[in-house]
Amino acid sequence: MTPLETASKQVAALADADYVEVRKTRNRTGRLTHLRLTAHGRQTFQRHASALERIVAAARGPQGA
């Protein structure tokens, strides 16, 4: 599977899960794919980023120790 095919499958999975909206356009040089986070995707991303921040904070230990 080529990297482009892999990316296309990932984008389709994100769109199916309602994380992104996909818009395809054409210009002089070829096709373009535009992605935009949905409200659901933005909320999910923010929860994920917060969870990662908590993991990093726990790994660093208490401040001043």
Image (cartoon, helix red, strand yellow):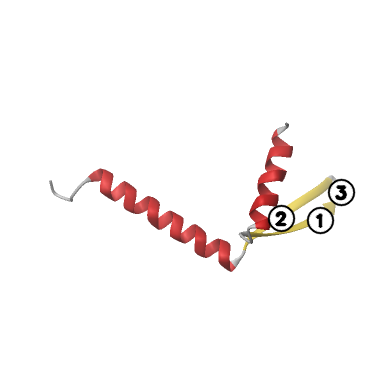
Q: Secondary structure at mark 1?
A: strand
Q: Nearer the viewer, residue 32 or 55?
A: 55
Query: In whole angstroms, how far apart are the C-alphas of marks 3 and 1?
Result: 10 Å
Mark 1 vs 2: CB contact within 8 A: yes
Position of residue 41 relative to residue 10, above or below, is: below
| Disc nearer the start of the sequence (2/3) | 3
Q: Label 1: which residue? A: 25
In the image, residue 20 lies at what x, y percent?
A: 64, 59
Q: Tag 1: residue type? A: Thr
Which label was assigned to residue 42? none
Position of residue 30 relative to residue 24, above or below, is: above
Residue at 66% in and 51% down: 13
Nearer the camera: disc 2 or disc 3: 2
Q: Nearer the viewer, residue 27 or 9?
A: 9
Which label was assigned to residue 28? 3
Residue extending farthest left:
65
Residue at 44% in and 60% down: 47
Query: In whole angstroms, how far apart are the C-alphas of marks 1 and 2?
Result: 8 Å
Q: Residues within 10 Å of mark 2 (few under 14, many from 20)?
A: few
Q: Label 2: which residue? A: 34
Query: In whole angstroms, how far apart are the C-alphas of marks 2 and 3?
Result: 16 Å
Q: Tag 3: residue type? A: Arg
Residue extending farthest bottom:
39
Q: Is residue 10 left or right of residue 58?
A: right
For the N terminus, give its image quadrant.
top right
